[in-house]
Image (cartoon, rainbow, N blue to C red):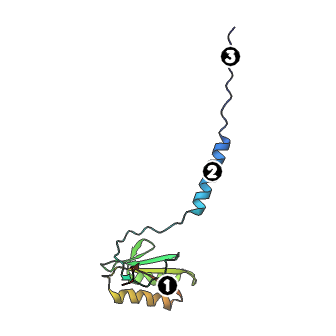
Amino acid sequence: KKKTIAFRPLDITPLIDIVFILNVFFMLNLQLQAPHHLRLTLPRVSQAEDPVQSTHDILVDAENQISFQGRRLEMDELPALLSNLPSDSKFTLGADEKADYGRVLRIFDLLRSRGFSSVRLSVTRTTAP
């Protein structure tokens, strides 16, 4: 007599459920950041606050090119983009230490004149002298 062995099909439904739950968990806990494709050499200061999560990043590189949320743009395009944002938006303004100081101040002034009160400057913290 031959014995026949019956194979039960493998039920992978619980495995799929666990993978889905883990995927949702990691997606909710992932902190998304805009890709910074500009290379900036930030100014160094000894007294700097800890970085906070901002909702919008504006960067000025050494060649005075402006980048908003990772997209390059001209200075005259910035007001139109800002007009579509809520007034409680948080900004981080980063500028290369070789960037034109006047251009950075004009961006800062534009943000403040549009009613954005939460504007932080990106710097690199150094040890105290």
Specify few, some or many for label 2: CA neighbours under 10 Å numbering under 14, 14-19, or 20 or more.
Answer: few
Question: Exactly how many numbered labels are in the figure?
Answer: 3
Q: Position of residue 17 (x, y in %)?
A: 66, 47
Which of the marked residues, 1 or 3, is nearer the chain's N terminus? 3
- Identify the amino acid type marked 2: Phe
On screen, residue 13 versus residue 64, left or right, reads right
- Identify the amino acid type marked 3: Thr
On screen, residue 111 versus residue 27, left or right, reads left
Q: Residue at x 36, y 81 (%)?
A: 43
- State whether residue 116 appears in this view: no
On screen, residue 47 versus residue 62, left or right, reads right
Q: Nearer the viewer, residue 43 or 8?
A: 43
Q: Nearer the viewer, residue 25 or 108?
A: 25
Q: Position of residue 75 (x, y in %)?
A: 39, 83
Q: How far apart are the alpha carbons under marks 2 and 1?
A: 38 Å
Q: Tell me: residue 33, above or below residue 1.
A: below
Q: Tell me: residue 44, above or below residue 8.
A: below
Residue for badge 1: 119
The N terminus sits in image quarter: top right
Q: How far apart are the alpha carbons under marks 2 and 3?
A: 37 Å
Q: Residue at x 64, y 53 (%)?
A: 21
Which of the marked residues, 2 or 3, is nearer the chain's N terminus? 3
Q: Residue at x 49, y 90 (%)?
A: 112
Which quadrant of the figure has residue 24?
bottom right
Q: How far apart are the alpha carbons under marks 1 and 3?
A: 74 Å
Residue for badge 2: 20
Please, which residue is most extreme toward the top here? Answer: 1
Specify few, some or many for label 3: CA neighbours under 10 Å numbering under 14, 14-19, or 20 or more.
Answer: few
Q: Position of residue 100 (x, y in %)?
A: 32, 86
Residue for badge 3: 4
Q: Secondary structure at mark 1?
A: strand
